[in-house]
Image (cartoon, rainbow, N blue to C red):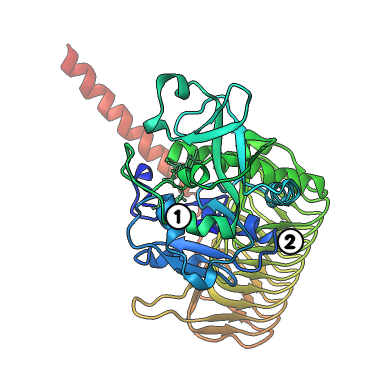
Amino acid sequence: MVLAAGKGLRMKSRIPKVLHPVAGRPMLLWCLSAARALDPARLLVVSNPDHDGVRSAMDGRVHTVPQAEALGTGHALAQVSSEHRTPGPVVVLYGDTPLLRGSTLQSMLDAHLASGAVVTLLTAEVADPQGYGRVVRSPAGAFRAIVEEKDASEAQRRLREVNTGVYCFRGRDLWPALSRLENRNQAGEYYLTDVVRLIKGKVHTVPVGDEQEVLGINDRVQLAEAEAAMRRRILETLMRAGVTVTDPRTTFVDADVEVGQDTVIHPFSTITGRSVIGEDCVIGPFAQLRDSRIGHGSRIERAHLEQSTVGTNVAVGPFSRLRPGTELAEGVRVGTHTELKNARIGAGSAVPHFSYIGDAVIGANVNIGAGTITANWDGFEKHPTEIGDRAYVSCDTIFIAPVRIGSDATTAADTVVVRDVPSGSLAIARPEMRIVEGYTARRRARRKARTQEVGKHGAAESR
Ligand code: UD1
Ligand code: CA
């Protein structure tokens, strides 16, 4: 069971707390994937029925248990209907602990089953226990109770062993105990932590190895802490799988990103969403990739890509922008200050400098000269530009779309292409150039004469 119906007031957000992303994935989904590692017979999520977003964010098969009013973690559990009140082991965790690992849950469950305890708690010895429920023990070290910070005495607040909010219960003892919960505490809530005290029988505690894993996110400072830890974890997984990350401190990769072997990611790069990077690529420095696919052996440097597909051995950047719908075939080169949008560029073609190519299909081995623009928008609608294989587009060509340029066609520099260009022909539209001989010398002479005039008058005035 994952509890996710809380108000999350400390986040000061209009979005439910459990939907705030950590490394690109809502924190609730991290908790669900840890829970799935147990291969549970059923997976229940307690959520507020008003939080539509929570239900739609959930992946896979999950039963939702509605808790309309967040009256406490114990009350949340009490909302489970009788059909789900199974007698066997029930693992409970909170939807705000995204760093919790499935393997930790598994070893805790194993310990629970082996010990024969009625309740097993995952506890942590933390440097700063602030905000957590403290584990109170007898002088001999036996578990006594969990005391919430609000209800704790001065001495209890000094205890550094805390409740992580991860529990294994024996179902047949858990469900009846819930009806005996009371809310006479500082928060006026029905605490799940009290259930542990109410259930008669052996309580077993399992210490967590890595304190960070059980970080509960209550505010955005903790959210940033979880983000940093998760990103580090993702990068370490990539590095162990054969990806070089030259500076993990300035590299950000989302959880669902795939990166191939021997790819190098240079500093200040961000790869997010469902991006897939091939093998032997060089990404960055300063690359931002969102939901994009990059083929093997490509180099993306100082560029911004969104929902774009890049083939093998492509070079992009520096200073290129690939907007949604860009598709680059094998060996394409895209250079400085080039913006592409909804554009397919064929194999071996190049858009090396200062261009805007939008709503276009460009064939193979086409050269697009510097300053080329597809004028795709007439103020009302978007129109396509088509350019055939091996066309040679000279500098400063403007294509007034819709327009088609045949294969092997050429445009002269500074041409505004207003109608289709047949294959193999030249489109040229420019005013004839004139030569004015001796111009520079005449101009300089005029200038000199003028400055001498001014000099004389100036001298007269100052006298
Ligand atoms: C809780 C524990 C505390 C523990 C800490 C670990 C209780 C009473 N306290 O405190 O001992 O040290 O977690 O992180 O359990 N929720 C509901 N319905 C509710 C209230 C909460 O579903 O009515 C959910 C929240 O969405 C959240 C989780 O339960 O995911 C924990 O609630 P939260 O308010 O964050 O509890 P803490 O104060 O952190
Ligand atoms: Ca919490």
Q: Residue at x 73, y 38 (%)?
A: 246
Q: Secondary structure at mark 1?
A: helix
Q: What percent of the width, then of the height, locates residue 226?
A: 55, 41
Residue sitting at 64 percent across and 53 percent down?
Answer: 317
Look at label 1 and name its amino acid: Leu
Q: Quadrant of residue 322?
A: bottom right
Q: CA distance from mark 2 to mark 1?
A: 61 Å
Residue named by callout 1? 178
Q: Amino acid at mark 2?
A: Val
Quadrant holding the C terminus: top left
Q: Earlier in the sequence, mark 2 or mark 1?
A: 1
Report if residue 454 is visible in the image: yes
Q: Is residue 378 left or right of residue 245?
A: left
Badge 2 vs badge 1, beta-carbon distance below 8 Å: no
x, y percentage for residue 47? 43, 62
Q: Which residue is mark 2?
A: 314
Few, some or many residues within 10 Å of mark 1 (<14, 14–19, 20+): many
Q: Is mark 2 within 8 Å of ligand 1?
A: no
For this view, does 194 lie left or right of residue 361? left
* Number of marks present in the image shown: 2
Q: Residue at x 57, y 48 (%)?
A: 98
Looking at this rendering, what residue extends furthest in the top direction? 463
